Amino acid sequence: MADERDNELTNAHPDFRPAAQRLVTLDALRGFALLGILMPNIIAFAWPMAAMTDPSVMGDAPANRVFHDVTSMVFLGKFMFMFAMMFGAGVVLFDRKTAPRDGSKPRLTDGVWLWHRRCFALLVIGLVHAYLFWYGDILVWYAVAGLTLLWWIRKLPAALQIWGGLGVYVCGSLLLVGVSAFGLWALSNGKVEASELMGGDSSLEITGYLGSWFDAFKTRFGQTLMMHLFLGPVYLPALWGIMALGMGLTRAGVLTGERSTRFHATLGIALVAVGGLLTYAVYQWTHTVTDYPGFLWQALAQLVGVPLAIGYTQVVVALARTRAMAPVTQAFANVGRMALTNYLLHTLICTTVMYGYGLGRFASVPYPDLFALVVGVWLVNFIFSALWLRIADYGPAEWAWRQITYLGFRQRVTTGPPSPAGMDA
């Protein structure tokens, strides 16, 4: 009966979206963000760390420069931003699941131990992923953000989460820019070598990742430890800001498609236009102020990418509200429901192709071929997610995560909508 009533309301009022559709929209956004993240990540999978900021490491072919520019302006920082916002949305959904069912007044501590057990489980998964498989892991820092601040700000007014989150994000991003500027200053004054600033000796990375699994582990361990001890803490404030913003935009109905189609489409088109121009202008500017524009852009991309990232979400939400796009929306939603599984699958596929204990293609695949590999991985994500969800409610990694979180106890469910099954399992 509930489904019939939802259908009646949807047909009578095109701008109404029942709870189930709101969750499909969130899952589709999460899937879209996850797939987009692979574009900048593929360089970290396939080439030494220096290639992430300097495409000449990959060779002098013009195509490498073109694809590097496209990736830097269209993808870098934007999809990471979207994915982190979706983790913030997950805090709101998890809060609804753990709210009191007896009508009593909600307390700030409701569900706190369940939430922190969930984040601790994610931390363990992230540490295993980072040290044993790939240094570019983001799960560790999502878990740290969840274990520290997020649960305690979930009930702040939505407007404060939005604007306060943006403020914290800008301050955190400026901190990253400052660290990058200091690095460039140290380089120009002979305090560090260029190779140190860009990630170390590329020849050692190539030798390590083309060797055995243990050779790759030894190479990866130092890189991962450096990121966890030095880069991660600098990045954490910006991450808090993004996730707080995601909470506020979810509660305001902006990420769940609860505003009018015109609202989402207009906001999306406007932000994509403004964000695109801003991104292009600042990207070109970096090439005029330093001989290492890619290094500076790694930090600036996070800061100037906000309009474009939010614009992307609104274009997706607007399209998800149209019946003609329902099959496409569902395909992305399937990927989003299995976001943790698909994120780990990216690592499994890409390291198997690139590393010496797999096909051994590390530091040898040019950018056009890398783009083809990304498309191939996307197809695997779409097909695998659709087939798996025909036989199960959760992806394999999501199922394991839930088992650890709930420790075999029956999940408490409120009368509110269920949580999506992706990074919010």
Image: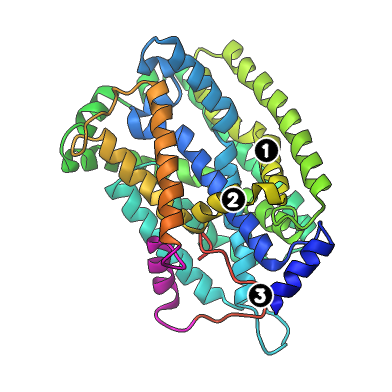
Is residue 403 a member of the stretch shown in magenta? yes
Image coordinates for residue 48, horizontal then vertical, percent: 33, 27
Image coordinates for residue 371, horizontal then vertical, percent: 43, 28
Between circles 1 and 3, the one closer to the viewer is 1
- Side (left or right) of 322 relative to 75: right
Q: How is the image coloured?
A: rainbow
Residue 141, disc: none
Q: Callout 1: few (<14), some (14-19), or many (20+) C-alpha neighbours within 10 Å?
A: many
Q: Amino acid at mark 3?
A: Leu
Secondary element type, mark 3? loop
Q: Residue at x 32, y 42 (%)?
A: 349
Q: Residue at x 26, y 40 (%)?
A: 352
Q: Amino acid at mark 2?
A: Pro
Q: Residue furthest bottom?
A: 102
Q: Which residue is mark 2?
A: 327
Q: Residue at x 40, y 52 (%)?
A: 384
- Side (left or right) of 45 relative to 289: left
Q: Earlier in the sequence, mark 1 or mark 3?
A: 3
Q: Amino acid at mark 1?
A: Val
Q: Which residue is mark 3?
A: 108
Q: Quadrant of the N terminus?
A: bottom right
Is residue 45 a member of the stretch shown in magenta? no
- Side (left or right) of 267 relative to 144: right
Residue 306, disc: 1
Stretch of the chain drawn in magenta: 390-410
Secondary element type, mark 1? helix
